[in-house]
Amino acid sequence: MFIGEYQHTIDEKGRMALPVKFRADLSKGAVVTRGLDRCLFVYTLDAWNALAQKLTALPLSQSKSRAFARLMLAGAMDVELDKQGRMIIPEYLREYAHVKKGVVVAGVYDRLEIWDESAWSAYKKTTEKESNDIAESLAELGV
């Protein structure tokens, strides 16, 4: 289970140290891919395989299904942690998420999200302001 919010940096080689508390879960490898809201998603191999199976089961005849599967699957990259607990984030993914140096790693239960620091701050500010409306909408779903 991934939870919490952590400030980190990406070096000039595209390496980023992961929070220590998450390293054991990702020590056998991970997958990083394009996420939603211009962030990156990081999954354990097991969580990735479960998601990939769902994505490949989507109806091929529906354009939105194809588009979402392409976004997630074609953008994915296997990553491994080095001895310092760092992973390399490919340049095309750093460009997608507009991450340069300062990033926020957010634990979102079954995945990590990597955000550009300023994008996370703006997103969080907007979401916190709208939290009552969001909560009311989720109540309709039984949350």
Image: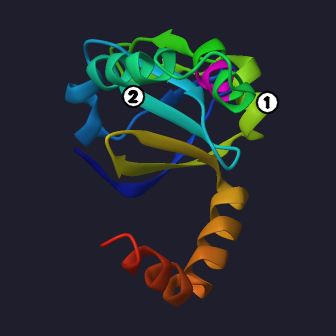
Taken as a whole, is the magenta stretch helix, strand or loop?
A: helix
Q: Position of residue 67 (x, y in %)?
A: 72, 26
- For residue 36, above or below residue 93: below
Which percent across, then down, holds residue 10? 62, 34
Label 1: which residue? 95
* In this view, 49 is above or below 93: above
> Which residue is nearer to you in this view: 4 or 72?
72
Between 112 and 67, the one nearer to me in the picture: 67
The local secondary structure at tag 2 comes to: strand
From the viewer's perspective, tell me whether residue 77 is left or right of residue 83. Answer: right
Q: Is residue 123 left or right of residue 63?
A: left
Q: Residue at x 34, y 13 (%)?
A: 29
- Mark 2, residue position: 43
Amino acid, disc 1:
Glu
On screen, residue 62 versus residue 6, left or right, reads right
Asked if the magenta segment contains residue 143, the reply would be no
Residue in view at x 59 percent, y 70 percent: 124
Q: Secondary structure at mark 1?
A: helix
Percent x, y for residue 108? 38, 50
Instruction: Residue at 48% x, 10% y: name it.
Output: 78
Q: Residue furthest front?
A: 61
Q: Position of residue 102 (x, y in %)?
A: 65, 47
Distance from the alpha carbon under mark 1 to that under mark 2: 19 Å
Residues shaded magenta: 68-72
Q: How many circles with numbers are drawn on the protein?
A: 2
In the image, residue 140 above or below residue 76: below
Badge 1 density bin: few <14, some 14–19, many ≥20, Cα 10 Å = few
Label 2 crowd bin: few (<14), some (14–19), many (20+), radius 10 Å: many
Identify the mark at residue 79; answer none if there is no mark: none
Quadrant of the rendering where the C terminus is positioned: bottom left
Closer to us: mark 1 or mark 2? 2
